[in-house]
């Protein structure tokens, strides 16, 4: 049975939840895990894949990022770019360890989320949701904003100089 006090308590809980949702609109959060600075590169009309980046901070015990969900692509996976002898290559990664107290930064030229089978072109200013799935913390939805960028990911053997990164990230250092 729900008595009057219980009903008021329930209403308060709903209100608090609503406020909490507003606060975390920009930063995806689940317990001790916070994901910020989510952005993706704009894509050209013919591009079938896109890339997304963000910063993960973990105030709790070590966790692992094990997967993604998004409605804007057939699938999304973790990749690592490496340049060996002037040639860039990407390697899929099954999981990524998220240490405690050390930000994990996904950025051009390194770790990124590869979104394959885009349902449409990504235009500057577009926003979409990418759900990060952690082994312990579970699902963390993150808002990703599309920002300017060239199609370095597929068009070139070499990646552009890091000025683009600084521009894209607004020069914010998570530390
Ligand atoms: Cu990739």
Image (spheres, rainbow, N blue to C red):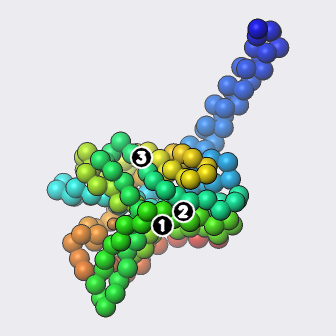
Instruction: Name above or below for residue 3 compared with residue 90.
Output: above
Instruction: Name above or below for residue 49 compared with residue 5.
Output: below
Give the spatial CA distance, label 1 vs label 3: 17 Å
| Quarter of the rendering occupied by the N terminus | top right
Residue 142: x and y in percent read: 50, 49
Contact check, label 1 and label 3, Cβ < 8 Å? no
- Tell me where residue 5 sits by quadrant: top right
- Outermost residue, bottom side: 85
Residue 82: x and y in percent read: 37, 79
Q: Is residue 112 something one can see in this rendering?
A: no
Q: Nearer the viewer, mark 3 or mark 2?
A: 3
Residue 106: x and y in percent read: 48, 67
Q: In the image, what residue occupies the spot 59% across and 70% down?
A: 173
Q: Read off the residue under disc 2.
A: 55
Judging depth in this view, the residue of 112 and 148 nearest the camera is 112
Q: In the image, what residue occupies the spot 69% across and 26% down?
A: 15
Q: Nearer the viewer, mark 1 or mark 3?
A: 3
Closer to the chain start, of discs 2 and 1, is 2
Residue 117: x and y in percent read: 25, 51
| Residue 69: assigned label | 3
Contact check, label 2 and label 1, Cβ < 8 Å? yes
Mark 2, secondary structure of its residue:
strand
Closer to the chain start, of discs 1 and 3, is 3
Q: Is residue 109 something one can see in this rendering?
A: yes
* Picture quadrant of ligand 1: bottom left
Mark 1, secondary structure of its residue:
loop
Q: In the image, what residue occupies the spot 67% across and 48% down?
A: 31
Mark 3, secondary structure of its residue:
strand
Judging depth in this view, the residue of 1 and 47 nearest the camera is 1
């Amino acid at each position: 049975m729900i008595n009057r006090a219980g009903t008021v308590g329930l209403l308060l809980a709903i209100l608090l939840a609503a406020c909490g949702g507003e606060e975390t609109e920009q930063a995806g959060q689940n317990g001790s895990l916070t994901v910020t600075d989510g952005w993706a590169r704009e894509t050209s009309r013919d591009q079938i894949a896109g890339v997304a980046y963000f910063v993960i901070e973990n105030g709790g015990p070590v966790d692992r990022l094990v997967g993604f969900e998004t409605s804007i692509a057939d699938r999304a996976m973790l990749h690592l770019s490496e340049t060996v002898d002037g040639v860039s290559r990407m390697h899929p990664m099954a999981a990524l360890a998220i240490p405690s107290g050390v930000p994990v930064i996904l950025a051009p030229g390194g770790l990124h989320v590869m979104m394959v089978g885009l349902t449409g072109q990504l235009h500057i200013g577009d926003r979409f949701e990418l759900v990060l799935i952690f082994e312990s913390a579970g699902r963390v939805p993150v808002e990703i904003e599309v920002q300017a960028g060239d199609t370095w990911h597929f068009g070139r053997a070499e990646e552009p100089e890091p000025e683009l990164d600084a521009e894209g990230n607004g020069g914010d250092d998570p530390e």
